[in-house]
Image: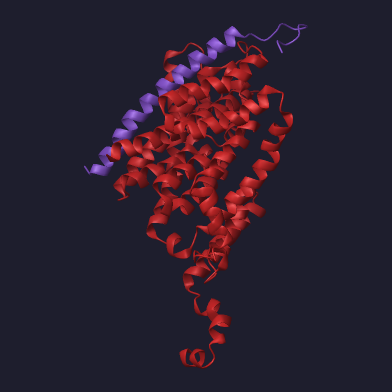
């Protein structure tokens, strides 16, 4: 073949794709196909898994121009990576969109549910400890733990700072497991709760309506408190709450709609395909990535255990019993986790409607995951000194 | 124990209590906010 190429140099141009192909590329095509299958057939986070799967195909064609890093011939996925991920722009824009979609009313009506959300962040830290046992460096272990926030943008934000080489697998793990909440959480909850506990009914008697002024001031208050505690988290919590204030102000409906619609769709599309573009075979097909995928599942299990056990602990001291299952909704996978737990309660007792409580805890999970992300961002450099 | 594990445990030991502290401040501040600006009674106009 080499003789032929020397004799006919143009053959090299025509055959470079075939000549550069290895089994690793083919395996990555299969992984891409699985992601696309999950998105299209199973409807698991399709807005992200479909672009990620397709981006991974583009990144795993030998000599792909889409991911070229050659100066003057940069591929569009590399340009998007530099312009949206390396500088943390896309996750922040996604947070503006999420904020505009969030309704914090159930959280304001019953702020104590934020405690469950704090407990459900346990998975982040327990998984980080486990990752160090498996040989990961501290900053990589902390970035792996953040999968347990069940919050894609926070995962990407932290990874782009402290584990840029693991960005692809960390993002895939975060979004895949978020979509697998209905598969992961129920067996864990069944294992650590009794049937009687799952049947506990919760009332709605002390829930007063929330004024527009309160809804408007709530995001400002959260930004000020979280920002003072961990200034490094201001970009994350600030963008989330900026989106929310657009919505709650009631005076910029067009901007709020744009954030919820066009901005959310456009950035999701670009974010997904750019992450897919980072999934080159040589980076993805490693033992390290296999461990990350396993640790991601562990993080979600620990989150669920943390939230449920905290609710059970509160029941020991509280006269009004809480259905411990709502503790599991303290993760950021919204509204999936809330719905899953509400369905489980109905399955246990068809007259037990805990959806509002579950959604309240789930909304709190959105805030708590960003606070946890901010604390991790602040503590990684502090502990590396 | 490895140094990385000690750092991860330290992170957990610092972050989790801080997190609960911040959340408690959120809870008190949210309750105060909700109390300071109650929703208008039925039939009344909202404050805007």
Identify which residue, A356 or A51, lies in the foreground.
Answer: A51
Q: Would residue A53 be found to the left or right of residue B7 on screen?
A: right
Q: Nearer the viewer, residue A358 or A1?
A: A1
Q: Residue at x 40, y 61 (%)?
A: A286
The red-tinted chain is A
Query: Could one spot residue A189 in this view of the protein?
Result: yes
- State the image quarter where residue A290 is shown: bottom left
Q: Is residue B14 left or right of residue A175?
A: left
The hue used for chain B is purple
Q: In which image quadrant can residue A144 be found?
A: top left
Relative height, residue A173 to residue A213 (above, below): below
Q: Dividing the picture into quarters, in which one does residue A203 lie? A: top right
- Of residues A146 and A385, the one nearer the viewer is A385
Looking at the image, residue A274 lies above or below residue B28: below
Q: Is residue A314 above or below residue A366?
A: above
Residue A41 showing in the rendered view = no
Q: Would you say A175 lies left or right of A100 here?
A: left
Residue that lies at the very extreme toward the right in this rendered image: B43
**Residue A340 point in image, percent of width and height:** 59, 35
> Looking at the picture, how far across and down is residue A17, in whole percent?
55, 76
Say which quadrant the C terminus of chain A sits in: top left
Where is residue A138 drawn, in percent x and y?
Answer: 32, 44
| Residue at left offset 55%, top offset 65% | A29
Count the marks.
Answer: 0
Residue found at the far front of this picture: A72
**Residue A313 drawn above or below residue A158:** above
State the colouring used for the structure image.
Answer: by chain
x 33%, y 29%: residue: B14
The spot of residue A227 in percent (x, y) is: 46, 26
């Amino acid at each position: 073949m080499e003789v032929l190429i020397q004799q006919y140099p143009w053959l090299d141009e025509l055959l470079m794709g075939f000549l550069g192909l290895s089994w690793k590329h083919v395996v990555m095509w299969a992984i891409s196909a699985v992601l696309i299958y999950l998105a299209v057939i199973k409807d698991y986070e399709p807005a992200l898994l479909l672009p990620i799967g397709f981006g991974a195909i583009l990144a795993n064609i030998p000599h792909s121009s889409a991911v070229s890093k050659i100066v003057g011939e940069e591929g569009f996925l590399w340009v998007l990576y530099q312009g949206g991920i390396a500088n943390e722009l896309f996750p922040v824009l996604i947070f503006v969109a999420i904020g505009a979609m969030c309704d914090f009313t159930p959280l304001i009506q019953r702020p104590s549910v934020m405690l469950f959300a704090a407990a459900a962040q346990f998975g982040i830290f327990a998984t980080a400890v486990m990752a160090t046992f498996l040989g990961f460096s501290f900053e990589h272990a902390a970035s792996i733990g953040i999968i347990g926030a069940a919050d894609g943008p926070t995962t990407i934000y932290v990874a782009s700072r402290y584990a840029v080489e693991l960005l692809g697998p960390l993002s895939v793990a975060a979004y895949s497991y978020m979509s697998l909440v209905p598969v992961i959480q129920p067996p864990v909850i069944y294992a650590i709760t009794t049937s009687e506990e799952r049947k506990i009914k919760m009332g709605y008697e002390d829930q007063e309506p929330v004024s527009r002024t309160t809804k408007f001031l709530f995001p400002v208050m959260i930004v000020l408190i979280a920002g003072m505690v961990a200034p490094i988290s201001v970009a994350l919590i600030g963008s989330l709450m900026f989106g929310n204030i657009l919505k709650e102000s009631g005076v910029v409906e067009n901007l709020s709609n744009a954030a919820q619609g066009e901005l959310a769709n456009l950035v999701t599309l670009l974010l997904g395909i750019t992450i897919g573009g980072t999934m080159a075979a040589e980076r993805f097909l490693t033992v390290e990535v296999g461990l990350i995928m396993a640790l991601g599942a562990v993080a979600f299990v620990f989150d669920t255990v943390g939230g449920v056990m905290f609710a059970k602990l509160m029941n020991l001291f509280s006269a009004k019993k809480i259905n411990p299952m709502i503790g599991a909704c303290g993760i950021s996978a919204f509204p999936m986790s809330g719905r899953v737990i509400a369905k489980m309660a109905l399955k246990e007792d068809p007259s037990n409607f805990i959806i509002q409580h579950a959604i309240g805890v789930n909304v709190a999970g959105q805030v708590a995951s960003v606070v946890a992300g901010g604390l991790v961002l602040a503590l990684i450099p502090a502990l590396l000194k | 124990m490895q140094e990385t594990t000690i750092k991860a445990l330290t992170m957990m030991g610092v972050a989790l209590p801080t997190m609960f502290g911040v959340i408690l401040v959120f809870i008190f501040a949210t309750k105060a906010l909700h109390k300071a600006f109650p929703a208008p009674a039925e039939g009344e106009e909202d404050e805007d």
